[in-house]
Image (cartoon, helix red, strand yellow):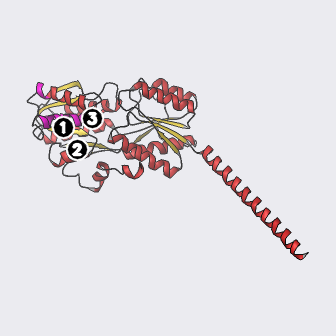
Amino acid sequence: MRRKFIHALCSILICLMIMSCNKQSQNKEATDQNSETEQIEIALIPKGTTHIFWNSVHAGAAKAAKELGVQIYWQGPLKEDDRQVQIQTIQNFISRGVDAIALAPLDARALIPSVKTARSRNIPVVIFDSDLASEDYESFVATDNREGGRLSAKRLIEVLGGKGKVILLRYLEGSASNTHREEGFLEEMKKSGKGIEVISSNQFAGVTIEKAFQASQNLLNRFPDVNGVFCPNEIVTQGMLRALQTANKAGKVKLIGFDANESFITALEKDHIHGIALQDPFKMGYMTVKTATQLVKGEKVDKRIDTGVQMVTKENMQTPEMQLLLRPEIDKWLQ
């Protein structure tokens, strides 16, 4: 009798333990589902996805997402002139119902309707890197590109000793960030006096390195007596550097570029590039995600967030500050 009682008691205890475990499992499952449901979703749509600059932005965004516990979706065109792909990407994320959209507009005007549509659906929009020709957004996270252009002009004037013939090779019509750099450069050049002559400023390189290389070769052939060149982004700088090296003019013609990669670092060391205006794309990505998260939570944010710009030269490139900008921690956050 006693054995039967003990056996029955053990059976009851086992059943209670199983029920308890099942309940705990169900509670955990419900908690996990709630966490997934409540997790903030942010779509980040860059101008392109193939260059080191965008990888750095992506890495900064990934770091912020991990620290803040939000989900990010990184999707953009392969080439930085595919407006239709960018517009369609925005529409897809609007339909998906993400909590916020962060956009680097390929075209300052063409993307305005898409941004308006997002905001009409109560999806806050953060613009990053390149401006929109409208203030119909919540916040703008970017470099002061006009200041970057001015810094580049000052450096070119310095390495030319205040005299010489200069070329500005532009990037792409409609790209606000590059246009502001180009305008800042020309504004500063006007202050330089009669010693500096801008002999060409109306040519565009295009969105591939090959096109930039061809445009650069054409300019070097047309103006063989040029002394200095400014290129407003990585693609244009890469094309011009290659053209100068091919023409055996690297180092002889002073080159000021924008943004960095490993070939530019080597060119700085060899005096083939004489200065690079460096943005902080990692910080830009981080602040974009942080700002979008704050907006979703109903917090106030600044309308304009400046992520800074520096001029790196052969003389200062080994400092810790410049090394961090030249070689951001991309692999650590994009594994």
Question: Where does residue 50 sit, x and y in percent of width and height?
Answer: 35, 37
Marking on residue 241: 1
Residue corresponding to mark 3:
235
Residue closest to the eye, 36 or 233: 36
- Are circles 3 and 2 on residues that touch, CB within 8 Å? no
Q: Are marks 1 and 2 in contact (CB under 8 Å)?
A: yes
Name the secondary structure under disc 1. helix
Q: Count the numbered circles shown.
A: 3
Which residue is at a point 38% across and 29% down the rendered structure image? Answer: 106
Q: Is residue 274 left or right of residue 87?
A: left
Label 3 to label 1, Cα distance in Å?
A: 10 Å
Rendered image quadrant of residue 272: top left
Q: Residues within 10 Å of mark 3 (few under 14, many from 20)?
A: many
Residue that mark 2 sits on: 264
Pick whichever, 150 or 76, lies toward us.
76
| 72 relative to 21 in the view: left or right | left
Which quadrant holds residue 152? top left
In the image, residue 236 sits, relative to residue 13, either above or below, namely above
Rounded to the nearest whole Å, what is the CA distance between mark 1 and mark 2? 9 Å
Q: Say if the magenta span includes residue 42.
A: no
Q: Residue at x 34, y 41 (%)?
A: 53
Tag 1: amino acid: Leu
